[in-house]
Image (cartoon, rainbow, N blue to C red):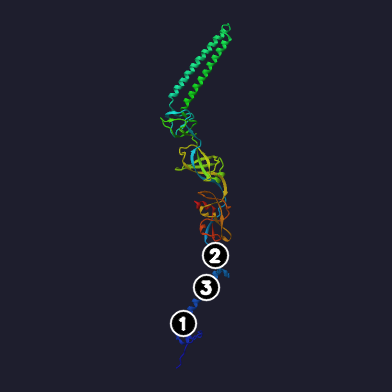
Amino acid sequence: MNYETKVDLSDTTGENLLLDDGEAETARVRKKRLLIALAVAVGFGAVAVFMLSGGDDPSAFAPDTEQSAPKITVLAPGATTIEGIISATGTIAPRREMPVGVVGEGGRVVSVRVEPGDWVGAGQVLAVIDRSVQNQQAASQSAQLSVAQADADLAQANLDRASQLVERGFISQADIDRLTATRDAATARVAVARAQLAERQARNAQLNIVAPAAGLVLSRNVEPGQVVGGASGVLFSIARGGEMEVMARVGEAELGVIPVGAMGRVTPVGTTKTFTCEIWQKLPVIDMDTRQGTARCAMAYDPALRPGGFASVELSSGTVVAPRLPESAILSDEQGSYVYIVGENNAVVRRPVTIGQISNAGIIIADGLDGSEQVVLRAGGFLTEGETIRPVVQGAGDNAATSG
């Protein structure tokens, strides 16, 4: 018997020689699928290698340090013209306070005619002191003046008659001289009596306590029935013309840059109302303990201004040209205030700064920046000097929104 056996000559392994026709076919299919899968995997691998390598550049397999650096928002603040404002606190007081007390000999107070908060005119009577005794003394002086005047009139009449008789030889010239001296003495006694009466009347007038000038009554320290005199102290306090001022306490250095005539805004504690004031004087003395000086800022009268009250003050110190940054960009430590700026190769660099005016709009950088630098806006506390970052520039127009 003759048997025919099919042999796949492409199978160099000779494995199919031991298999029948069905098993050989199955093996070929499996092997083909394996080869196709392997080819696909190799192709994908080659494409991936090409893409990662960026072509033929083998350095692409190195780690991308720039992509791994953190994104940090930075700001180039520029330099703007800013109105210099110095914030301070102070006490409201009358600009010219006039203390009023007893001028004359004093006595028992009969009546008090004003209350705190009243407006008075110059010479207006504030309180009246009993003058019953002084009135009798004035009456006595007036009577003495009348007696002296009568004596002077009689002496003048005697002199006139004697002058007519001396021409006829009945009276000597010596008698005329004596009568003339008597007349002159009587006339002098009239002048003395008149002066004494005027003095008594002036003293009586001083028993009335009067306002030395027009103004606002601030305090009253006397009541009817009280006995007052020269040692009684201040009975009334008056703000001349009702003018007020705020005694602003500012630092020694800041006081030097505030000019006389500068304007300011005053907000008394307990109210949202703001008043305009003008600096009219800077006191020459600096407090040795606080290193602060006083700027006196005058204001017109307003019922909301109460002497002795506390107030916040914003004083104008002229204009400055400087960068302004939000608070989040400024850091501080034992060495002082500083910011981080972007240096070469996007490495952060510490830059010491001097802080100027502080306001709701931001913080003025008085020294250390010219405004062209890229300043780290936030997260500066998480960075170290020399660290590489990926800066994301924020527009200068966004500064106000960030600093609010």
Q: Which residue is mark 2?
A: 65
Task: Give the structural element (helix, strand or loop) at label 2.
Answer: helix
Figure check: 185 above or below 293: above
Dot 1 amino acid type? Ala
> Residue 82: x percent and y percent?
55, 47
Q: Count all numbered tags in the image, as a single digit.
A: 3
Q: Nearer the viewer, mark 1 or mark 3?
A: 3
Amino acid identity at mark 3: Gly
Secondary structure found at label 3 = helix
Structural crowding at the residue carrying mark 3, measured as other residues with C-alpha within 10 Å and reported as few (<14), some (14–19) or many (≥20): few
Q: Which mark is residue 45?
A: 3
Residue 23 horizontal/vertical position (percent): 44, 84
Residue identified by numbered label 1: 27
Question: Which quarter shows the N terminus?
Answer: bottom left
Can you name the residue that lies furthest to the bottom here? 1
x, y percent for residue 173: 58, 10
* Residue at figure coordinates x 44%, y 23% from the top left: 135
Seen from the viewer's position, the closer of residues 117 and 25 is 117
Q: Is residue 319 above or below residue 147?
A: below
Residue at left offset 49%, top offset 38%: 93
Mark before the other along the chain sequence, 1 or 3: 1
| 213, above or below 175, in the image | below
Q: Which mark is residue 195?
A: none
Q: Quadrant of residue 74?
A: bottom right
**Dot in front, 1 or 2:** 2
